[in-house]
Image (tube, rainbow, N blue to C red):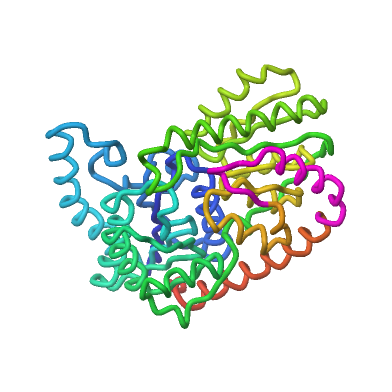
Amino acid sequence: MTVRVGVFGLLGSGNLGNDGSLEAVLRFLRAEHPYAKVSAFCGGADTIRARYGIPAARLNWYSGEYRHASGPRSIAAKALGKIIDVFRTAWWVRRQNVVIVPGMGVLEATLPLRPWGFPYALFLLSLCGRLGRTKVALVSVGADRIRVPATRFLVRYATQLATYRSFRDDLSRSAMADMGVPVTNDRVYPDLAFALPTPAAIENPRAVGIGVMAYYGGNDDRARGDEIYRAYVDAMTEFVRYLVRQERPVRLFIGDRMDLEVVDEIVETVDSPLLSAAVPGTLDELMCSMAEVGTVVATRYHNVLCALKIGRPTVAIGYAKKNDVLMAEMGLGEFCQEARAVDVPRLIKQFEELQRRAPELKAELAARNEECNQQLKDQFALLSRSLIPAEVS
């Protein structure tokens, strides 16, 4: 019997964290189940085929799914696409023995999100899996409480219909319980990116990495998104100027292609030979670049996670509770701020405290990273036992 494993999500679409979670699952499958035929149903099919060498189909029939519908034709195309995607999803799902949704914040709405976009696609996946008797596994996924009724409905039932669920933190598990999902038998495991190999690099202790984000607020902030963006970028620019005045080398990082606009603006505004930018294409490349700096200040969740994973003392400029939870779990809960209202004088004090306590914090991070790695090994062993069929010759 040929064992077919599908991977599903907004993969290959430019978000490094999403693709890093996929890479962790692919490493597991190739090491423990090399006979499995792996394919993807994803946002960026061309990227996934080229980068990972697996067959991939586009998540949505309509190529403009995640662009704003600006006229009758695009509205009609989107509506038609929703119908066609029912059959496309069912056809793909029924060909798999198991479909894995690898990590990611697939059960969140902390950033602007329309219910008939990815929440609808995830609901179709779980429904088709249940009807076609294909196992659907939500593995180390992130979740948060959702207030928009349509999004809440789709996410809740997508989660309930899944065969297997695990969450990347207690916050996610509690959020789904509050939304009516029975989570008694669901476990909490670390984010899948903790299973990726840790790169070795020559560290410059004086260098500082700054992970920036094109941040416009959440679903409730659409009317003032530009204002939030402007305040965030101005604050991060001011902090970079402070570091340059201290004659510290500064390297800017991104977590998604859309963050490049922030990088370009800060580089142009500060205009210093001490300032450089890294534009990684994968989470591994991001960690390799981060490993060369001594301290990190970052906004995107997986920028923060990568810095912690490679043992760098970090300040998180978070846009959701998940950032604070991750920092607390790794022993750095006091080094957090909110992206929507960055306090630069306080950030400077946090940075200076981080520098002073660097040896202590690095030792703590090393111990906690080891714990995370072992927990993920346990989860992968559980997936092998309970979800992935053995090869039959």
Depth check: give the residue in front, 31 or 212.
Answer: 212
Q: Is residue 343 above or below residue 122?
A: above
**Which residue is depicted at the point 33% across and 52% down?**
118
Q: Is residue 191 above or below residue 175?
A: above
Q: Is residue 14 left or right of residue 223?
A: right
Q: At which x and y percent is residue 172? A: 49, 66
- Image quadrant holding the C terminus, namely bottom left
Residue 238 in view: yes
Q: Horizontal placement of 307 versus 261: left or right?
A: right
Q: Which residues are magenta?
A: 336-361
Which of 56/170 is in front? 170
Answer whether residue 209 is magenta in the image: no
* Residue 31 locus on image (x, y percent): 58, 61
Quarter occupied by residue 30: bottom right
Q: Is residue 55 visible?
A: no
Instruction: Give the image location of residue 168, x and y in percent.
Output: 54, 65
The residue at 49%/45% (across/down) is 52
In the image shown, does 284 or 365 lie closer to the viewer?
A: 365
| Count of residue discs | 0
Q: Quadrant of the N terminus?
A: bottom left
Give the residue displayed 12% in from the left and 34% down from the top: 72
Main structural element of the magenta stretch: helix, strand or loop? helix
Instruction: Estimate the x, y position of residue 200 in percent, counting from the top left.
Output: 77, 45
Which quadrant holds residue 63? top left
Q: Is residue 387 left or right of residue 25?
A: left
Q: Residue at x 57, y 71 (%)?
A: 379
